Structures are given as C-alpha cells and as structure tokens.
Image: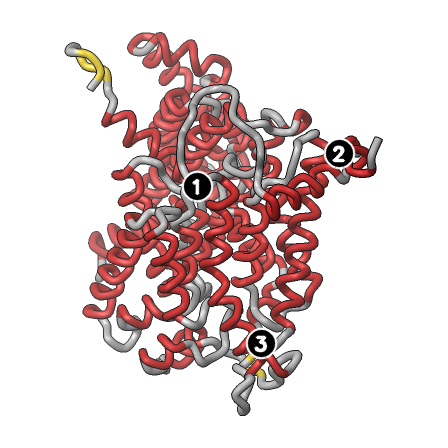
Amino acid sequence: MTGLTGEMTHALVVCFSAIFTGNMVLSYFLGLCPFIGVSREIKTAFGLGTAVVFVLTFTSGINWAAYHYILVPLELDFFRFILFIIIIAAFVQFVEMIIERFSPLLYVNLGIFLPLITVNCAILGVSLFMVIRDYSLIVTVAYGFGSGLGWMLAIVSMAGIRQRLNESRIPYGLQGPGITLIIAGLMALAFIGFSGVLQGR
Amino acid sequence: MTSVEKIRKNRFIAPIFNSLESFFFGSDESVRRAPFIRDAIDLKRYMFFVIIATLPCTLAGIYLYGLRVLAVIGVSYIFGVGAEAVFAAVRRQDEIHEGAFVTCMLYALIMPPNVPLWVVAVGILFGTIFGKEVFGGTGKNIFNPAMTGRLFASLAFPDLMTKTWLLPVDGNLAGGFASWVSDAITTATPMTLFQRSGDIISNLQLFMGYFGGCIGETVKPLIIAGGLFLMITRVANWRIPLATIISLLFTATILHAIDQQAFAPPLFHLLGGGFLFAVMFMVSDPVTTPASRTGKWLCGILIGTLTVLIRTFTGYVEGIMFAVTIANMFTPLIDYIVLGIKYRVTPKGVI
C-alpha cells in the first residue's frame, strides 16, 4: 500500500477512530458546553450536530492549508492559535447566515449556541491535534469529519436520553446540568470499551 | 398507637417494613385510577420471577466456588437495598421497589468469586445510586444498574477484578457446599487464555462450565433454563436475546472465515465468558432496551456485533459489558427513530 491508497486507508482508519476510540466528547471531554446546553431535544441537537460536522470538516481543511502554506513558510507557527480561531469565527459567521436564510426555526432554536460554535473547544481541538499529529490534508479532513460525526452521535443520544427523562423524578439538585454530567460520565465509561480499536494516529 | 402503627409513621423504617410486609403477605391495595388491568402478574411477581430464574445459577456458583459466594450476595444485598432504602426514605416513598432485589442478585452473580467484599460494596453502591436512583428509581433508569456497577468496579479496580480467578472446588460430591472458598487459583478465564495464547478449551467444557469465571456465568444449561423460564412466563421478551445471539454468531463467523488463527470460532464466542448470562438476564430487561419491536431487533444486532468487535480488537475480553451499556445509551434514540418512522404525519393523517 503506497501513495494514494495508503493515504486513503489511513484517512478511513483515522475517521473511524475519531468517532469511537477518540470521541471528542466522551474521551477528550472537548466541546462540553454546547453538549450540555443544547441536548434537551433531539431535533435541535441533531441540527447543531450537523452544523458542527459541517464546520469541523471545512475548517480543518482550511486551517491545514493556512498552516502549511502561510505559517510554516513564514516561520510563524506560534501564531496558529490566533489564525485558527479567526478562520473558525469567520466560517461560523458564514454558516450562521446560511442557517438564518434557509431554516429560521433551527436558527431560533439554536440561539446563542450557534455563534458559540466558534468557541466550541472540539473545533479548535481538531485543528491543533492535526498539527501535533502531523496529518496530511486528506487525513485531516477525514479526521475533522469523523470528530464531527462522533460529537453528533454523542449529543443526539444524550438528547434522546434527556427527552426520556422528562417524566422522571430526578432529585431536585441534580436537574438540568447535574444529571447531564452524570449521564455523560456513564457514557464515557461505556466508550472506554472502544479504546484500543483502530488506534489510528 | 400500636407498635405497628408507630413503625408505619417512622419515615426511615416504614419503606423497609412495608416492602417486607408486601413481599411476604401480598398487597391489599386496590387501584383507584385508570388504567385498570386485570392480570395475575404485577411488579412484585415480575421481579420475583427473575430471582427464581437466577436461583439455579446461584446454587451452581456456590457448588463450584464455595460458600463465600453467599457472602458476596449478602454484601451486595445489604449495600444495594440499603442505598435504595435511604433514597426511599428521603423521597417519602411508601416502600422499596422490588427492582432492587433483582439488581443486587444479578450484580452479585457477575462478580468474580474471590473479589474483595469492599469492591462488591463500592460497585453496587455506584450501580444503585448513579445507575438507577438519580434517574428516579425502578423503571426510570437508562442504564442497567447491575451492569453499570460491574463496569465501574472493573474499570476502577482492574487488578482486583481480573487478575486472579478461582478454579472450581475439587473432589467430593458436596463440592463448594462443604467449603468456604475454593483454594485453587488460576490467572486466566477461557477468554483471557485465548487472547494470550490462542488456546481454546472444548465446547463441551465451556457448556458445562467447569472452569474459572464469574459466579453465575459459567454453567450454561442452567442459564439457558433460567432464560427460557423468563421467556415462557413473558417476563422477558424473546426478540432481543434472539437478535443478539444471531448477530454475534454472524459477525464471529465472518471474522473466523477471514483468519482462523487470530479470530475465535463462533461457538466459542457464544459459550465463552458472560455472554449468555448477560443475554438472558440483562439484555432482555424491558426497561433499558427499546420498547418497539423493530427497535428490539436493532438493539440486539448492535449488542451482538459490538460484543464480538470489542472482544476481538481491544484488550477487554468481556465485550458484552461495554456492548450492553452502549446499547442502553442508544435505546431512547432507537425508540425515537423507530416510532418516528412508524407513526409519521402524512397529508392523509397519522399512519
């Protein structure tokens, strides 16, 4: 396996391991704020998840190009935090305009959490991991896509659980974020089972 | 005021007293509001049937590994029911739900027989409190409490839970009933043995269960009998266990066909480890698995496939533990999607 085929296999492995083994929420605990804030309903959770998948896939690719063609030649790679955040912010603004134009209902439901995708740590995390792990462009995009899918899987299943809990008698002090964090912990316990599968680095 | 009335007034003793009373004497309450369902079975009998179904496995566990098994079960009951009683008292609930008795029993049966008793206590406390009570008690839990407790214990204390296993008590006819604990120790269950060296013990030996393992998981005929009893009495549904077993055999057959040396044969996966026990007593749990029929098939397929994949490709030989918890996690979502497709709104109305 050389050249393109090897690269594609690597990309596939990295993509799957980003969904299960190295899930952004359940094993790195990144992107927890919207994970807790927007997981009350399956529909909004799914909408936000789709937005995150979209933003992650594209920003990871753009950031890769910016890093390798602007920062590295100029030897300015310590600027990567600022540049990555600016690119992410601009891209999120763009997505926000699209969603407002095509799905006003989703726009209202997502509310403040849509612009907050900018500061979703999962998104900056993917860009930084791609630098640390020295991924190529194809692998980076696959990694961004897989991370987004993993994040979406986690938030949608969390929303399903929370919808079912609507009728339960949860202790007063634990309602809302408390029970959500407990569920997230139990989900992370279950996802430990995947550790070691497809150790795609 | 008679002493019985005094007890009924006491907030902390009342739940325990009431549940013991209704457990032994039955209930004289009548329902005031709809739905009125005339049926011989209620929540108490429901849960009691599960305990009956696990009794053969319990006796087999004692016979194989010694009377210490009773201590494990006892500790599990004291701490599990204790936690439940505290919650019932704080909530001002009338009695302890029978679900606790089942949880403690199943939890004890999936512990290694030589596990320190304090680990048993920590695990069942975690399982009861964080697996069940914070979600609102029996019938409201998302995750299977017994499995959650086991998962927590085995990840928190891996050395104590997986390093050493007891071999069955040797010699006389009385077996474990005559000794406190078996003194023969091994470092590997058949599952770990296969992962380390590729050795496979015969299917007959796996089936009869004369080897080291968790208390209730080894003797397969008794497990199958218990599971069939639950299915015939309609306490458990047959769809999920069937779907799980079929998908496990299917995935294992494909893997075994690819590489005969590296991947275990399907029957080994079926009979090895805690798979059958979990399938019969935990996967069939009506609370933590989907309610819809299609959902049940999907959930079973998910569990079976994940079990083989986790057992084969990770360091964890007991894949079923993770597979069940992951399936529990996706259960509400599966139900939501299946019901959403089945009862969708169309221009002609709801179908």
Q: Give how far across and how far down residue A96 sits, in percent.
A: 39, 14
Task: Give the image quarter of residue A127.
Answer: top left
Task: Give the image quarter of residue B335.
Answer: top left
- Give the structural element (helix, strand or loop) at label 2: helix
Which residue occupies the foreground of this view, A80 or B264?
Answer: B264
| Residue found at x 16% / y 10% | B347
Asked if residue B104 lies left or right of residue B285, the reply is right
| Residue found at x 71% / y 62% | B118
Residue type marked 2: Arg
Q: Which chain does the residue under circle 1 lie in?
A: B
Point out the frontmost of discs 3 and 2: 2
Which residue is under mark 2? B8
Asked if residue A121 lies left or right of residue A52, the reply is right
The first of marks 3 and 1 along the sequence is 1
* CA gap, disc 2 and disc 1: 26 Å
Q: Which residue lies furthest to the bottom in this view?
A: B171
Which residue is under mark 3? B164
Which residue is under mark 1? B41
Which residue occupies the foreground of this view, B253 or A89?
Answer: B253
The first of marks 2 and 1 along the sequence is 2
- Give the structural element (helix, strand or loop) at label 1: loop
